[in-house]
Amino acid sequence: MNIRKNLKIRFLTALIVMSLIITGFPVTRLVRAEETVNYYDLYTGAKDATSARYAKNLGQRFVVPTGTTLKSVNFVELATWGEVLPVDIQLYAWNTDFATSKAGTVLAEFHRDTQNDNDPINFVFETPFPAGEYLVVFKRDENNSIVTQLLYTNGDTTYFEEGLPVAGRSAYINIGLLNAGVPVTEPNTTEDPLSYVDLFTGDVIEATHFEQNQGQRFVVPVGKFLKSINFVELGTWGDVLPVDMKLYAWNTDFATSAAGPVLATYHKDNHEDNQTVDFVLNNNLPAGQYLVVFKGNVDNQLATAVFAKKGDTTFFVNGVENTDKSAYIKIGLTTAEENTNTGDTSTYFAALFLMIALSAILYKKKAFN
């Protein structure tokens, strides 16, 4: 009798636990922690040359070793000969040569409307790519002054200019690698690409300095989802500083919004002067108004260049509206409702398991009464 009773209890317990796991209730599970990104330079030596000013089809082939995955391609500097230019970068799987690879499927894209001379670029992939050979193309057929500093090759890599290999040379690039074991999924090549919307316009007016509670309200239009908040530059007045950012739903004013629930966070330990910051969200957020606070009650020199505002946006300094101005920010929008919880069949199966378990418990209780 006791054996039958114990078996029933174990069976009912298993049903309940299975239901809680599937529905996402907080049942303790073993989860692998995200691993540290290791950066590998494709170059060595000192900068001693520059690609031809108007050369086209600039790119670099590189290898992601077995046992690692590719998280990012990082340009230590990308030059513009003193101009401010748009940048479009594409990642491809390597196939035979430059032309064949470039004719293949684009695995990932990066766009920036305004690249300043020698600014860094961090081309980060939300989903890491597996071991293999890749080609990053950072200038296609554009007739502009985008160029790269040239160094010497470090390992199995090839730099291309006008689509042709340049022996022994490398662009000023490193790659971010993760150890194998971080979940990897194949890229979704049908996903709508990001479109970037500048919140600023015109030339720099001024820069912030020691002011606290700096942030920006912005609007995600109907039919779009928010994927990222991108700081073209975030200054430190020459210091190396930590950065902590928080995203909130907009509610009435700065103080009320910043007292609400935090929708997403970003942290960086060592931010150098005028580097970019790409605050990429794990879950796309729907149309609406948001507030990003990129400096809270912090007494340091984290700062932003200030421009005239573009569109329906509000810049705050010391928590107070800075009329008609904007920080050096753009937002990344998509039409894809990626990673948002819309429900699936697992939810219904979980509910069914839970109902069966609860019904059995109630029936058993009634029978004993």
Image (cartoon, grey):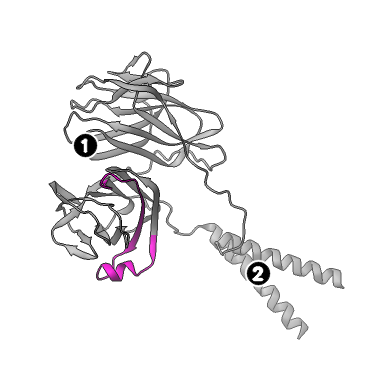
Q: Give the CA separation, mark 2 to mark 1.
A: 62 Å
> Closer to the observer: label 2 or label 1?
1
Relative to the observer, which residue lies in front, 161 or 172? 172
Residue 263's quadrant in the figure?
bottom left
Q: Is residue 62 left or right of residue 3?
A: left
Of the numbered discs 2 and 1, the one sitting upstream in the chain is 1
Q: Residues within 10 Å of mark 1 (few under 14, many from 20)?
A: many
Residue type marked 1 = Asn
Residue type marked 2 = Ile
Q: Is residue 170 something that shows in the picture?
A: no
Image quarter where the N terminus lies is bottom right
Range drawn in magenta = 234-263
Residue found at the very far right of the displayed protein: 1
Check if residue 256 falls in the magenta segment: yes
Residue found at the very far top of the displayed protein: 167
Circle on res. 116: 1
Residue 141 screen position, x and y as percent:
23, 25
Q: Residue at x 39, y 56 (%)?
A: 265
Q: Residue at x 70, y 73 (%)?
A: 360
Disc 2 designates what residue? Answer: 356
Q: Residue at x 23, y 28 (%)?
A: 146
Relative to the observer, which residue lies in front, 231 or 340? 231
Badge 2 element: helix
Residue 238 screen position, x and y as percent:
27, 44
Badge 1 element: loop
> How many marks do you count on the picture?
2
Q: Is residue 58 something that shows in the picture?
A: yes
Asked if 182 appears above or below 257 in the picture, the reply is: above
Asked if 76 appears above or below 328 in the picture, the reply is: above
